[in-house]
Amino acid sequence: MPEPPTLAREPYGDGEPAVLAAGHVWGFLSALRAAGVTTALPKQADLLRVVGESPPRDLTALYWYARITLLHDIEELAAFDRVFAAWFQQGGLPDAVPPPPAGESDVPSPQGPGEDDPAPREVLPGDGVEASTLSTYGRREFDAAGDRWRSVTRALEAAWPAVLPSTPSRRRRPARTGDRLDVRHAWRRAHRHDGEIIELRRRARPPRPRRLLILVDVSGSLRRHTPDLLRLAHTALRAAPARTEVFTFGTRLTRITSALSHPHTGRALRAVSERVTDADGGTAIGTALREFLGVPRFVALARGALVIVLSDGLERGDHVPMVRATARLSRLGHRLVWWSPLACSPAYSPVTRAMAALLPHLDHLGGVRDLPTALAEVRRLPAVLSGPRRAAARRWATPRPAPRPAPQPAPPPASRSRSTPSGSPLTTAPADGPPPGAEAGGLHAGGIR
């Protein structure tokens, strides 16, 4: 581990220390972002909380507070040390940025807008029209589905245990067939029968279900689909409570496994509404996934698990962090499945920069926008799990068949006419219809009524 820069043990200045410290720390965080050191907003809040609850004795303690809390990539250590030394050791104050008002944020996109991003427009937080990097702080009430989808919910709860992959357990158990003899059992039985070996038992590693990790996008672009996606995660948690973990992400990462564990769907969704504070806000998929991979205990949840991401993949700004985090998540997990509401459309094709770069790392890209489409994708999981790894790119490289046009109604048959002796035309019935006057005259298909 590299040594920290030499820092003088200087106490804080006098005269309104709280105001001076708050402004100085805020300027330091702004300088870090300007220098290219990516720090998530929850990490910045953690630093301020730590400094407030346990004030550092000197600059060395403050350095390690900031480094352990903010830094998650060793490649950014040089820039971090340079900014810290300029703001705390050398006393530099380059263009201090005042803190924004409460409820606002000036966090820019990772590298600004892309070339194909739409023109700037008036942004309404949570309007669900497009992906945004704005962070909103608020709660949304997620209502239960009611009786409308009760049968589909029960079908999902019954389908999850049958489709989850399994792996041999680490511990061996007595079994009729196995690759090892149960020597202890044979010795005990032989001791009871004067040293005679009566039967041989074996030991095997019984299968156990793999862990299921579900990551749900709750940003504004998925406003219409978020309640159904959470209900889908709730069915998985009810079907396999001991092996399922659920997270949400919009502009920050939130673990909702405990909040969603209530057996009643309505109460579980109300608990999620109180826990999730970035619903219907901006989109920062790359930041959220990097935050997930930056916590070792979260990485342990993904190792060898079936990872399902419920998102449209609409990332604003630079998509490279999202692609790198997804690639690592694919290497950690047993399978990586991406379900997008956009893929439900027959005309959909992953041609955006982000989805085109993600596709080689995915094992399956399917469409889920409500509970019936989710049930269809869950039942398709055994075929995905038994197939080759990272097959999504090969599947989507094949052109999808165009939807068949709706059949047009056949034109009515032309009527035949002939002339009467008086010269007036006499109209007769079509060849496949009843004669004229059948209803009035009492005729029907079988003859005279």
Image (cartoon, rainbow, N blue to C red):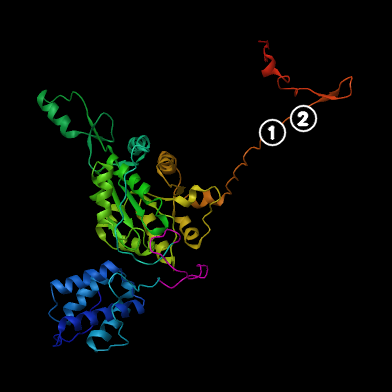
Count residues near mark 2 (Cα–Cα under 10 Å), then give few for <14, some for 14-19, many for 20+.
few
Q: Position of residue 441 (x, y in %)?
A: 69, 15
Q: Residue drawn at (69%, 18%), measured in percent from left and top?
A: 438
Q: Secondary structure at mark 1?
A: loop
Q: Mark 2, mark 1: which one is toward the viewer?
A: 2
Going by the image, does 188 lie left or right of 222? Answer: left
Count residues near mark 1 (Cα–Cα under 10 Å), then give few for <14, some for 14-19, many for 20+.
few
Can you tell which mark lies on residue 98?
Answer: none
Return the residue nearer the eye: 257 or 279: 279
Return the residue nearer the eye: 208 or 199: 208
Q: Which residue is mark 1?
A: 410
Q: Position of residue 124 (x, y in %)?
A: 41, 64
Query: Given the current orientation, which residue lies at the most extreme front position?
Result: 422
Type of amino acid under label 1:
Ala
Q: Position of residue 346 (x, y in %)?
A: 54, 47
Q: Looking at the image, can residue 372 be seen?
A: yes
Q: Most prominent secondary structure in the magenta stretch?
A: loop
Membership of 119 in magenta stretch? yes
Q: Secondary structure at mark 2?
A: loop
Vertical placement of residue 118 versus 418, above or below: below
Which stretch did the figure color magenta?
Answer: 110-130
